[in-house]
Image (cartoon, grey):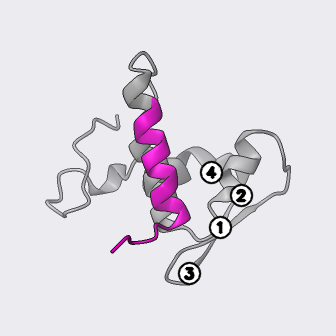
Amino acid sequence: MFKSMTLAETSLVKLKEYYRTNPEMDVNYERYYNLFKTFKNWRIYLAYKYGLTGTEPLVFETRSGVIVEVPLRLLHTFKEIFMDECYLTGTGTPHSLQRDCN
């Protein structure tokens, strides 16, 4: 039976296909998958990134209901924590990425 996919899963499939067919792209789709899987309202980040909103702080809600307010000056740190998962590297957790975040 066909399992319906969530928007995050559908987006990941599209990103994988795009980067598979465009290997010259240097962007890692895994960062956006982490954003999709962690936050209910991940569209806010994309709206800010593409200039569709200028609200500050950016207010995200995790899938477990935790509210995260991100002032624009801390957006880089937010991305390190939630998109790159830098602070999990080397911890041996199933979600730790093997990337250099220095």
Mark 2 residue crowding within 10 angstroms, few (<14) / some (14–19) / many (20+): some
Residue type marked 1: Asn
Q: Are marks 1 and 3 in contact (CB under 8 Å)?
A: no
Among numbered discs 2 and 4, the one appearing first in the sequence = 2
Residue displayed at 71% across by 41% down:
49
Name the quarter where the C terminus is drawn. Answer: top left
Mark in front: 2 vs 4: 2
Q: Are marks 1 and 2 in contact (CB under 8 Å)?
A: yes
Residue type marked 2: Ile
Q: Is residue 7 above or below residue 73?
A: below
Where's residue 4, x and y in %? 46, 70
- Which residue in the protein does label 1 denote? 41
Residue 94 found in image quarter: bottom left
Q: Give the Cα distance between marks 1 and 4.
A: 18 Å
Residue type marked 4: Leu
Mark in front: 1 vs 4: 1
Residue displayed at 59% across by 71% down:
40
Q: Secondary structure at mark 3?
A: loop
Whether 14 is among the magenta residues is yes
